[in-house]
Amino acid sequence: MCRIVKVAGLLLALTLIASGLLLTACGGGGSKIAFTSTRNSVSAIYVMNEDGSSQTRLTSGGTRNYYPSWSPDHKKIAYSSGAVGRSEIYVMNADGSNQVRLTDNTWDDQHPSWSPDGKQIVFQSDRNAGRWQLYIMNADGSSETRLTDSVANDEHPDWSPDGKSIVFAANNPPYTDNDYNIYVIDTGGKKRTRLTDNSATDWYPAWSPDGKHIAYITNLDNSWQVYVMDASGEVRTRLADSTDGGTAWSPDGKRIAYEYKAEIYVMNADGSEQTRLTDSTGENMYPAW
């Protein structure tokens, strides 16, 4: 009997371990939302459970920390930090430990996004005479390569789930804040395709996990809204009121996190069941799931 119980227990343990590994590999089960908050009078990176519980600060000090981005395995977070007086890209463990600087130049580097295999990071930099362009580097900060070379400001990159392209927002001369549109470019930088075309501001695009849709923020209706369009830019659907603070899909693609009136909310991918997660002083923004 003892041996049977031990064998059964061992099988159960192996099953649970296998299930846990599967959930981790798929990005599911117990996934956390990272975000930026100014609740302590300085922007810092926080994480919380997907129901808003256990909000925990990861970065400390009086520097600006923002734009968190989860690695595909959810073990690391890339982010922008002003720790050295200008914005640089850093990476840290999911618990905030081992904070390592990846970029080092005299201009600003911001808004990192991981490749789906976790080997590279795309980010925006204004090292090109103050104009934002997209760059790609290895996950350890080596081999920086310029991706875009345009007259526009290219910002807010997000790597596609299939690894073949990057969606981003861009504005063309005369560089007004009310003239951003969504573009997509292949990772070789050869084919640049415009997805939205209007006189409004469309930015902070985010791929759905299956690569079929893109969520983004727009003021097309004279107020900030969350929209979703298909990957070709053809079909666009208005989902919810928002504030200018980014969007993020849940790993299973069923929900979207976004900012509204300085707080983080989540909703179903069709815009239903809008639920507030944060409730604090300061602004909560730039969710990453």
Image (cartoon, rainbow, N blue to C red):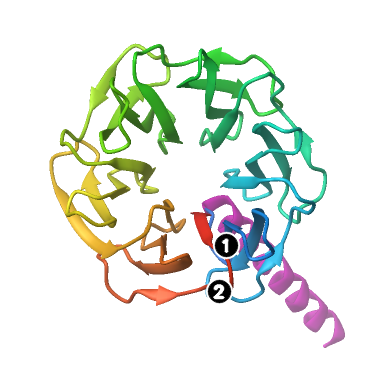
What predominant SS class does the magenta segment belong to? helix
Residue 236, horizontal then vertical, whole percent: 16, 49
The residue positioned 24% from the left and 57% from the top of the image is 223
Identify which residue, 20 or 273, lies in the foreground.
273
Of helix, strand and loop, which one carries label 1?
A: loop
Residue 31: numbered disc: 1
The residue positioned 53% from the left and 69% from the top of the image is 50
Q: Residue furthest right?
A: 2
Identify which residue, 256 or 276, lies in the foreground.
276
Residue 267, horizontal then vertical, whole percent: 36, 69
Q: Is residue 155 above or below residue 191?
A: below
Q: Is residue 94 left or right of residue 232?
A: right
Could one spot residue 249 in this view of the protein?
Answer: yes
Q: Amino acid at mark 2?
A: Gly
Q: Earlier in the sequence, mark 1 or mark 2?
A: 1
The residue positioned 37% from the left and 32% from the top of the image is 168
Residue range (magenta): 1-26
Identify which residue, 22 or 91, lies in the foreground.
91
**Residue assigned mark 2:** 52
Identify which residue, 215 or 169, lies in the foreground.
169
The residue positioned 24% from the left and 50% from the top of the image is 219
Q: Is residue 268 above or below residue 159?
A: below
